[in-house]
Image (cartoon, rainbow, N blue to C red):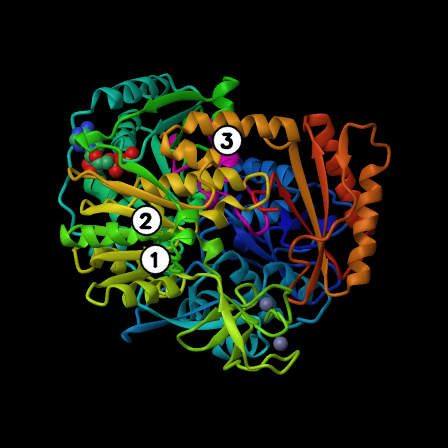
């Protein structure tokens, strides 16, 4: 038997399939999709590969084939359909087929796994301390030579947050390999609370379908028709916050199950909490598998096996659950479809919605997108007819939409209020406390960084590796770079002029909490942001505490804006709005709108009416106006006009090529090279912009230069660009790296 093997290699030109002989002893185990070990090229090391085809022996082979050394998997997660999907991904996102296939493999590598549990209270988890690009670079330039190191690091590129013991067992490597990687600064080891075991701790009472409201009924009936007809369709449920979208999802899943088909439900990583999972488990019990990156790898592997074996019909998870090994899908639901976590930021930088659409099309399944603030490009598909629209304009269960009030910060200046909390909001918080009701204060992350500057000479404490201001953490007096984790402690002298007059700038959640405590010492406050939620289940704990009424105020970043149902929250204060409005890439307005709108939606979710105070100096801004009038359509119309006028998606596609490397000169030369190759013979079919440094020019000691292409992509233009990239790959320098994003959301 001959096996065609796709080799796991980062070298683009080697992204080909090679023939190997399957020894008699392995013939029974050989199966398409299983990973194997083979010797490859002149290297002594064994390489990993995947069987993509099996064929009969040839009678008189021209040359002698090498034999497969070992078969690594006992279950195959990749069938011909998945191979096809991987090829599609590789093509539209310019990556290797193997990289695409890796997305579909279960977390963890070796198949035999005795998931022994530790008895200690804390687990040690391992994650990368450097970017994948940088590590790939070091591997390609032989800075990292040891095969074990490479194995460990490439594994971590695709699996974040892995238990040390899982690695040792799963990859069969010793603790010393991990220690070396840590010593060399490639990985970090954190102690975290023990994992969230969603299934074990869930003691949920069975729930039964609610009698749908009139609005829900229209949606359920409309979409069910497509499910019953087994026809490919994309549907958007545009429903205000609290309109009962989740109940609609549950009932649609019911329909698809009666058809004998299966469902995938995707939710943003951040809202994949007990509360969300509970609602699905309450309705469908053991029929649900959960995939969450904060579950241990052995747990996720178990879930993968359960899914593959066909024992579950519903998979719920974040972005990567779209690759769960589920066959016979009839329905894919993407909740909060506007969420940016549906765009992968690591190679391959895919858009989950594109992939979901492809899977549904292939399977004659229905794709349901749900949001109160759909992405502009999604809603535009409604306008041009590729997506069917369903609207839910009222909250279910008789709750009213909150009243929205704009607080003019210009007035506060006039009144001499220097606090970050406006006079109006201060009053409202106090009133709310008197009424024994709860308040959420939302601070956008952009306005949340706090920098240190010198009052004398204006020096800003930047990260020496990254060219960005480091964030100041007052509680432990340290400066931290959020990109590369560089730390400086106890800074109190300006390195430029020697002055000791150093002050922190801007507002952070921590500072806001401090201000509020000074203002109202008697109230209890909870804070939820990246700093308070390092441990795996801390997010849930904070939310539970707040929900149980153990605090008057919850301060938080974007994290608190996602679908949590808090019946006693009647006041939402939005702070730092101006920073949100001031962002400047093409998609920043839609993120600002959806952020402000979604946070507003946290107020008054139950019988008590809610109120939202939005603090801003820009009271006339169309985004604020649209939120106030609860009109997505007002916003959409202004925004789509702007995109059309200035040539942005969805009217034009953007391909952003980023070239990076430690040597600036080489990066510049390669960027120039790419620019010229792309421009060669281009008859104005697309526009190539000359190489440009991004906002952050140096990250992790690596320089970056972008080359942007704007085009109305069709098959011909795309394949043109594709072959040019292939050409560039053969001509580029070894020590630079190319990463590609299609229609990037952050430029
Ligand atoms: P969304 O997902 O649109 O934000 P939810 O599904 O969370 O909204 O629903 C908001 C609230 O309304 C929940 O408490 C839910 O139980 C309730 N609800 C939804 N549908 C119904 C219904 N048909 N009858 C009664 N209550 C409902
Ligand atoms: Zn840095
Ligand atoms: Zn100074």
The label on residue 178 is none
Q: Does the magenta portion include 348? A: yes
Q: What stretch is highlighted in magenta?
A: 331-360
The location of residue 153, given as percent across then percent down, is: 56, 65
Q: Residue at x 21, y 63 (%)?
A: 523
Q: In which quarter of the image is ligand 3?
A: bottom right
The location of residue 545, given as percent across then percent down, is: 21, 59
User: Can the viewer see residue 45?
Assistant: yes
Q: Residue at x 47, y 21 (%)?
A: 382
C-alpha gap between disc 3 and disc 1: 37 Å
Sequence order check, earlier mark of 2 and 3: 3
Q: Is residue 118 left or right of residue 32?
A: left
The location of residue 61, given as percent across then percent down, is: 74, 45
Q: In which quarter of the image is the N terminus?
A: top right
* Mark 2 neighbour density, 10 Å: few (under 14) some (14–19) many (20 or more): many
**Is residue 110 depicted above or below 580 in this figure?**
below
- Please identify, in this view, whether the residue under mark 3 or under mark 1 is nearer the observer: 3
Q: Residue beneath label 2, please?
A: 573
Q: Residue beneath label 1, please?
A: 299
Mark 3 lies on a secondary structure that is helix
Sequence order check, earlier mark of 3 and 1: 1
C-alpha gap between disc 2 and disc 3: 26 Å
* Mark 1 neighbour density, 10 Å: few (under 14) some (14–19) many (20 or more): some
**Is residue 247 depicted above or below 596 in this figure?**
above
Q: Residue beneath label 3, please?
A: 376
**Is residue 52 depicted above or below 301 in this figure?**
above
Q: Does the magenta portion include 73? A: no
Q: Is residue 385 left or right of residue 134?
A: left
Where on the picture, by quarter, is residue 238? top left
User: Can the viewer see residue 313?
Assistant: no
Residue nearer the viewer, 438 or 681: 438
Mark 3: C-beta under 8 Å from nearest atom of ligand 1: no
């Amino acid at each position: 038997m001959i096996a065609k093997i796709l080799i796991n290699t980062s070298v683009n030109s080697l992204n080909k399939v090679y023939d190997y002989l399957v020894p008699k002893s392995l013939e029974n185990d050989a199966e398409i999709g299983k990973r194997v070990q083979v010797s490859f090229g002149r290297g002594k090391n064994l390489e990993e590969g995947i069987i993509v085809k099996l064929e009969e022996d040839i009678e008189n082979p021209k040359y002698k084939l090498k034999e497969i050394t070992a078969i690594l998997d006992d279950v195959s997660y990749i069938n011909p359909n998945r191979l096809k999907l991987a090829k599609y991904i590789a093509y539209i996102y310019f990556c290797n087929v193997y990289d695409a296939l890796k997305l579909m493999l279960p977390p963890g590598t070796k198949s035999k796994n005795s998931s022994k549990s530790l008895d200690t209270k804390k687990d040690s988890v391992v994650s990368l301390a450097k970017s994948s690009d940088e590590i790939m670079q070091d591997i390609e330039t032989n800075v990292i030579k040891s095969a074990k190191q490479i194995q460990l690091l490439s594994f971590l590129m695709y699996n974040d947050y892995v238990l040390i013991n899982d690695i040792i067992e799963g990859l069969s490597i010793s603790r010393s390999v991990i220690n070396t990687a840590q010593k060399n600064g490639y990985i970090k080891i954190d102690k975290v609370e023990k994992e969230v075991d969603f299934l074990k701790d869930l003691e949920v009472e069975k729930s039964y379908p609610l009698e749908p409201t009139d609005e829900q009924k229209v949606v359920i009936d409309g979409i069910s028709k497509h499910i019953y007809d087994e026809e490919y369709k994309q549907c958007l449920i545009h429903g205000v916050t609290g309109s009962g979208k989740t109940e609609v999802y549950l009932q649609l899943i019911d329909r698809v199950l009666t058809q004998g088909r299966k469902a995938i439900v995707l939710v943003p990583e951040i809202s994949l909490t007990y509360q969300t999972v509970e609602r699905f488990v309450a309705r469908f019990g053991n029929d649900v598998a959960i995939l969450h990156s904060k579950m241990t790898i052995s747990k996720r592997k178990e879930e993968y096996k359960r899914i593959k074996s066909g024992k579950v019909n519903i998979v719920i998870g974040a972005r990567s659950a779209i690759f769960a090994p589920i066959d016979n899908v009839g329905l894919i639901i993407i909740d909060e479809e506007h969420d940016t976590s549906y765009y992968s930021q690591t190679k391959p930088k895919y858009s989950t919605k594109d992939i979901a659409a492809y899977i549904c099309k292939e399977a004659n399944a229905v794709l349901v997108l749900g949001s109160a603030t759909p992405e502009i490009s999604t809603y535009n598909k409604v306008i041009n007819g590729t997506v069917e629209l369903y609207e839910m304009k009222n909250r279910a269960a008789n709750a009213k939409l909150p009243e929205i009030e704009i607080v003019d910060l210009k007035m506060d200046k006039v009144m001499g209020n220097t606090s970050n909390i406006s006079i109006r909001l201060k009053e409202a918080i106090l009133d709310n406390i008197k009424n024994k009701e709860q308040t959420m204060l939302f601070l956008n992350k952009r306005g949340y960084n706090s920098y240190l500057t010198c009052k004398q000479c204006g020096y800003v404490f930047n990260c020496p590796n990254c060219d960005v201001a480091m964030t100041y953490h007052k509680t432990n007096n340290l400066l931290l770079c959020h990109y590369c984790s560089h730390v400086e402690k106890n800074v109190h002298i300006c390195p430029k002029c020697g002055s000791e007059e150093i002050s922190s700038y801007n507002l952070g959640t921590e500072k806001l909490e401090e201000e509020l405590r000074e203002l109202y010492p008697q109230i209890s406050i909870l804070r939820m942001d990246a700093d308070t939620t390092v441990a795996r289940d801390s997010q849930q704990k904070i939310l539970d505490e707040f929900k149980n009424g153990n605090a008057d105020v919850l301060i938080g970043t974007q994290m608190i804006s996602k679908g949590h149902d808090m019946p006693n929250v009647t006041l939402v204060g939005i702070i730092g709005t101006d920073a949100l409005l001031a962002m400047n890439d093409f998609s920043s307005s839609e993120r600002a709108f959806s952020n402000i709108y979604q946070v507003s939606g946290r107020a008054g979710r139950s019988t008590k009416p809610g109120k939202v105070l939005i603090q801003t100096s820009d009271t006339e801004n169309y985004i604020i106006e649209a939120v106030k009038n609860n009109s997505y359509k007002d916003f959409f119309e202004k925004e789509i006009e702007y995109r059309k006028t200035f040539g942005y998606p969805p009217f034009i596609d953007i391909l952003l090529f980023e070239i990076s490397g430690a040597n600036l000169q080489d990066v510049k030369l390669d960027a120039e090279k790419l620019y010229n190759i792309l421009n060669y013979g281009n008859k104005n079919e697309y526009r190539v912009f000359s190489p440009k440094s991004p906002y952050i020019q140096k990250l992790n000691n690596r320089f970056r230069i972008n080359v942007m292409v704007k085009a109305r992509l069709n098959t011909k233009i795309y394949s043109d660009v594709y072959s040019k990239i292939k050409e560039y790959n053969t001509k580029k320098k070894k020590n630079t790296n190319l990463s590609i994003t299609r229609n990037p959301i952050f430029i």
